[in-house]
Structures are given as C-alpha cells and as structure tokens.
Image: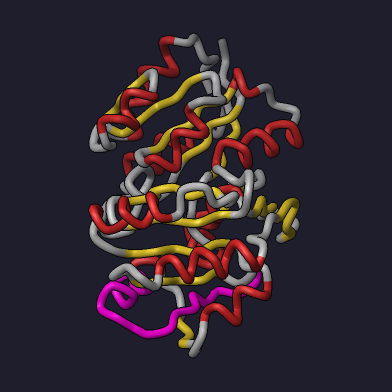
Amino acid sequence: MKFELFAFDLDGTLLRPDGTISSETKDFLRLLKKSSRITLATGRSLSSSWPYIEELAIKDPVVLYHGAAIFHPQGKSVLREARLPPELARFALKVAAAFPVEVQLYRAVDDPHIYVERISPAILVFSQKENLPVKIVPELEKMAAEWPLKLLFIGPEGVLEELRGALRGIEATVVRSERNYLEVLPPGVSKGAGLAWLCEWLGVPLAKVVAVGDQESDVSMFERVGLAVAMAHAPEPVRRKAKVVVQTIPELQSLIDSFGFPPP
C-alpha cells in the first residue's frame, strides 16, 4: 500500500536537540515529497513553526498548537481554530497556582508572544528554544477571558503529574508534550483530532497516513492512522502505541521500500 501523507512532529522527531534538522533528514524528506505529501503536527505556535515550514517547503496545511489550529502555508490562512473557554482556562490557572510550575498562555495564531506573569530561567530557556518573544502580564487570569488557544505549564515531571491529577475531570484536554511540559488545550483538541480533520479536508484516508512522533501528545495520532512510528528515545508507553520504532527519520526509507513505493 502506498501511504499518501506523512505527518511529522517537530521537537524530538524532525529536530535535533539544538533545534536544527540534519542534512540526512532533509535529503530524505525531499525524496519523500516526490511520492507523498508531508505535513507537520506540532504543539508549537505558528511563529515558532514557520521557519521549519519554510525550510522544508511544506505546501499542505499543518497542525499547530496540538490541533488547536490548522494553518495553510500557501494561503497563509487559518483553516480551523479551537479556543479554550474562559471558565476552563481560569480554572486551570487557579489550580496550577498551588504548584511550583511556570505558566504560559498562548493568545492567538497571529500573536507570536508567550504571555507569562514572570520571567524565570525556565521561561527564558523555552523562549530561546522556540525563538518566541515574551510578554509579562500582571494577571494571566484576566487574559483567560480572551479565549486563549492553550496553556503550557513547565515543571519537574513529578510535579506535573500531580498537577495533572488535580486537573482530572476538567473538560479540556490535558496532555504531556515533553518530559517537563504539561498542556491544557480546548475540549476535544488533540493532534489526532486535528490530523483527522486535515485528512478529511485533503481527501486522504487515515489508513493511508503515517504519523511520526515521540511524546504522549503524539499518541492520539498513532491511534488513528494507518501506520504509527515512534522515535526510539520516546517514553516506553509511547513506543508501545507505535507499530514501528526508528532511531532516525531516514530509517523510514526502508519502511517505504517495504511497502512498494513507486520510485521518484
């Protein structure tokens, strides 16, 4: 069977720890584009994803903010957007105030800023990693009234699991996106749901989609697509959800060959 679409996570999947894409991965993706479509499915914002969209010359719509937005690079337009209801955002912020975590709020697709109540070393590292400007606001709860796209909490793994437990029962989606990140998304939003919407828009059956990722937030894609691929460094529960595990992205070439892709 020929897969028609490959959906790639960014951090920990396409990107190396320094935020760059290896030449081997770029060469593989250039070859892959001759026989299949490729897209991104990332928790990153539009601003932090845009350099990679341009670098990889991605033409099809991409899944951003873990599915809270679907953005079309060619028309530079938002095809679909979901927002976090103010009451849910305020509740999550109130609960998180009792935990030693750093809080970020993402306001809108066309706003590149991350909004915080204070700048800490963890916030600085994050903003530098994703090349995003930071704005300090006295009370994030007031911004919650603007129906934000998502909230992101940064902290130790154990603390984030305690916070997740305290948020149990909230109607929003709560998901781990990296070892020290916990995110609160609009109800029903996930990478899997966003990718499913995109595939319907493109007319591509989910059975002919390959999803590649490395974190809990990618599992919702794994559960829907024809072939789920996890990176070898992914947490063990994530690897268990995948059908294939690879060390590097170019290793997918052998997978393509095994499925009898036509030569480019």
* Tally of numbered tags: 0
Position in image of residue 80 (x %, y %)? 73, 51
Q: Is residue 8 above or below residue 207?
A: below
Residue shown at 60% from the left, 20% from the top: 208
Is any part of residue 57 visible from this angle? no
Reply yes or no: does residue 140 show up in magenta. no
Reply yes or no: does residue 125 show up in magenta. yes
Residue that extends furthest to the bottom in the rendered view of this protein: 138
Q: Quadrant of the N terminus?
A: top right
Residue shown at 35% from the left, 20% from the top: 244
In magenta, the rendered stretch is: 109-128
Position in image of residue 207 (x %, y %)? 60, 18
Q: Is residue 111 above or below residue 248?
A: below
Position in image of residue 160 (x %, y %)? 32, 56
Left or right: 196, with 239 as reference point: right
Q: Quadrant of residue 122?
A: bottom left
Residue shown at 60% from the left, 61% from the top: 88
Q: Depth check: 79 or 171 in front?
A: 171
